[in-house]
Image (spheres, grey):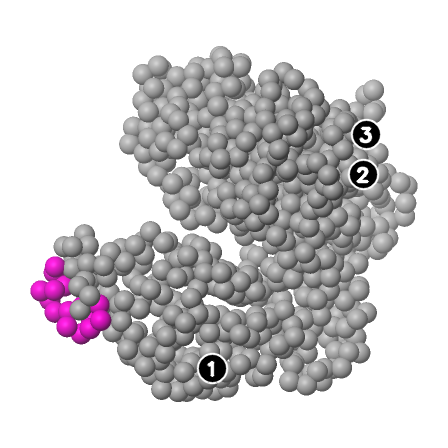
Amino acid sequence: MVFRRIVKGLKKTRDKLASGLASILGSGRQLDEDLLDELEETLYTSDLGITGTEIVEEAKRAWKKKEIQDVADLKVWLHKALLERLSGCTGQVCRASEGPTVLLVAGVNGSGKTTSIAKLAHWLKRDGNKVILCASDTFRAAAVEQLTHWADKIGVDIVKQGTGADPAAVAFDAVDAAVARKADYLIVDTAGRLHTQKNLMRELEKIVTVIRKRIPDAPHETLLVLDATTGQNAIRQAAEFSEVAPVSGLILSKLDGTAKGGALFGIRRELDLPIYFVGLGEGIEDLEAFDAEGFVDGVLGDALEAEEATG
Amino acid sequence: MFQNLTDSLTKALSVFSGKKELTEENVAEGLKAVRKSLLEADVHFRVAKDFVKRVQEKAVGQQIIQSIDPGQQFVKLFHDELTELMGPEGAILPHADSGPTVLMMAGLQGSGKTTTCSKLALYYRQKKKKKPLLVAADLQRPAAVDQLEALGKQLGIDVYKEDVKSDPVTVCKNGIAHARRLGHDFVILDTAGRLHVDDKLMKELERIVEACKPTAVALVADSMLGQDAVNSAKEFHARLPLTGVILTKLDGDTRGGAAMSIKAITGVPVLFVGVGEKPDDLEAFHPDRMAGRILGMGDIVGLVEKAQEQIDEKEAARQTKKILKGSFTFDDFLKTYNMIKKMGPLKKVMGMLPGMGAALKDVDLDDKQFGRVEAMILAMTPYERQRPQVIDVQRRRRIARGSGNDLQAVHNLIKQFKQMQKMMGKMGKGGGMPPELMGAPKKGFRQGKGARPMGGPFGGGKGKSPGGGFPGAFSLRKPEMMWLERTPDQAGPDLGVVSLHAPCAGLMKHLPAMESVLDW
């Protein structure tokens, strides 16, 4: 299975990506040092970072040992190697055994938290859950309005105060509301913060502490939203956020462009975090469960061919 | 991870030490580390490759300049090339000859356009005495118009908006007409974020350009962007007459390799950088400083500039003198701190020192926590502040009560202050700071004239000065990075401002003490 929408995204850009992996692997070329060097370059341009170098070194060894003989072999081998690195990385948002399940959503500025929350709320509601949103991004101008807009559009409740309110207090109220209204899910939006801002990171800790006052084992999930266009800095983000909040899963946003989100491999190298969802557009339907195979296909450019084959 | 790279780069460059010449071999080894460093900084693969090749050609066969070791020379060459690649220095936005200057913003979603719009408006009002107007043409993202309006209100800048159902092109056109009517001479068009592959939305931008004929078009790019930065920038450049790039979120720990790549591939210069969440956290771009950042060398020039803006030179010199005589009082401590505080949050200021970024990573330099120390000092009488030795237990109790701290906190503060005083006295008597703490100009750096033999934190004599180490002192700089201060004609700080560093020197000295103070 491949991501339907990734395919759509890639189709849009295929001309521009002629230099991508698909062209190296599908060109009928000889397997040689040059080709492997080009492979390394292409993996790098997909933000795989050091993982790209590792993979190509492994590939070179396998080639010397004649485990890989030609480009077709390489393609199969590469697919396997990439997939191995993502093994066990899918997951589903959990459900608390009783009471509302609290999902805390965090990320750096502009990573796409609010939009992802809207999509997630829609997703959960579609499955028959009662969802409440909590507008704890009280810092950015009009962030509350933005979330309110989505809440209205999806048809879910929202707990909010004005801009400048204490985000932890808003979260506390929201937890109360979620319990009282017997909600299945409470999704807490937080202000974007760079992981280097110690005081803002502490504020995030405080939100967690306050939520726990009401529901001790909450937040049941802390989701980190990562922008797929981010480079190697994504690894630092994942590590730093994990330190102050119990990050339990990732949402990879903006995967509908030409960026491949290869930094994910680097994150997997350092941290054992599952990836729950990928964001693929600005509409509320544009969210899909993460699928490792589809993701690898996307990186390798196979999705494109699959789509073309089926028409 | 990133900081380790600086270390690994430094390590790799140590192959040069003791060598007389840059040879193909030792250059190749250094370049390997450099290439890795570039790639980890998200510099585009192609750009890194070409760049390394160019440096290699220039480096091989270069004679080692006396008194500078090959490692330093190599780093300098590298730094210069990087600076040139990202240059030119001082690229500015063009202004319209007649009528209002119209600046159109474009970029991917979440790159920081709306925030940058308001920062720019403030920048041009404050620094260029313009009368800006913000035009809310992002009708795509929910509440984007509200956001711009709220920001405008906060800063007292006019915002032109229409119904979200209007056409962005019309909004822009009407906005400019509105500006003409009301005498605004600087118009900023905030457009919706869009993917460079979204043909429909890219056409919309083209239509805005056609209809509004903006004086300049700026691409707003997130400095954390990865390799794809080049793809998106290229596409925006192909479809719009880009004047420059504005790089956002540079206050994080990204090395910002995307900046270098965008400039290298598209030739579009970087105009501004966003360095924080506050409305005035926007700075003109300086390629040399960015080069330093990519190399992990800190922003010493920026620090000096900030110091120049904020610090009273006479006062600084006076304090240095007192520090050296060991007659530093609590009053001086407060004054020093307040001067530093004006330069920005403590951690940010300290982070501009080369090597400090890494050292400070785990040190919690919170200004608020320092406030407790401030409170204790303010709870002292002027007499006590001048003569800390008179503060006995009774006085300490009063100070503790008066400042809302416990007695132990006051004990600690006074103990540490005394230790500090003693240490500084020692240094004043010719000890000097340990070389690794001081950086070490051999020549070109004016030594203080008698009154300030230390010449600030980066002055001081090199060599195996006695004076002992500083307990828990940070290693401020790596020897390889010192060239910056070595040669007067380089980008290093202006010689005359050395004394301005004095308060920083003061701060540096408090650091070990402060660290334990904050450790409570």
Tell me the CA gap for discs 2 and 1: 54 Å
Q: In which chain is the residue bearing label 1?
A: B
- Count neighbours of disc 2 (C-alpha within 10 A) and say few if under 14, some if 14 to 19, many if 20 or more: few
Disc 1 secondary structure class: loop
Tell me the CA gap for discs 3 and 2: 27 Å
- Foreground: B286 or B317? B317
Q: Is B182 left or right of A72, judged from the image as shown?
A: left
Magenta highlight on residue B376: no
- Taken as a whole, is the magenta stretch helix, strand or loop? helix
- The residue that appears at 70% across and 36% down in the rendered structure is B99
Looking at the picture, how far across and down is residue B380, in whole percent?
18, 62
- The residue that appears at 68% across and 85% down in the rendered structure is B66
Q: Is B455 left or right of B127, judged from the image as shown?
A: left
Which one is earlier in the sequence, the residue at label 2 or at label 1?
2
Please give the count of numbered marks on the rendered protein.
3
- Residue B385, can we see it? yes
Q: Answer with the quarter of the image where residue A283 lies.
A: top right
What stretch of residues is rendered in magenta?
A: B384-398
Q: Residue furthest left?
A: B394
Per the image, the residue denoted by label 2 is B238
Disc 2 secondary structure class: helix
Per the image, the residue denoted by label 3 is A305
Q: Quadrant of the N terminus of chain B?
A: bottom right
| Amino acid type shown at disc 2 | Ala
Per the image, the residue denoted by label 1 is B448
Q: In this view, does A110 lie above or below B349?
A: above
Disc 3 secondary structure class: helix
Question: Are labels 3 and 1 on one chain?
Answer: no
- Foreground: A19 or B383? B383
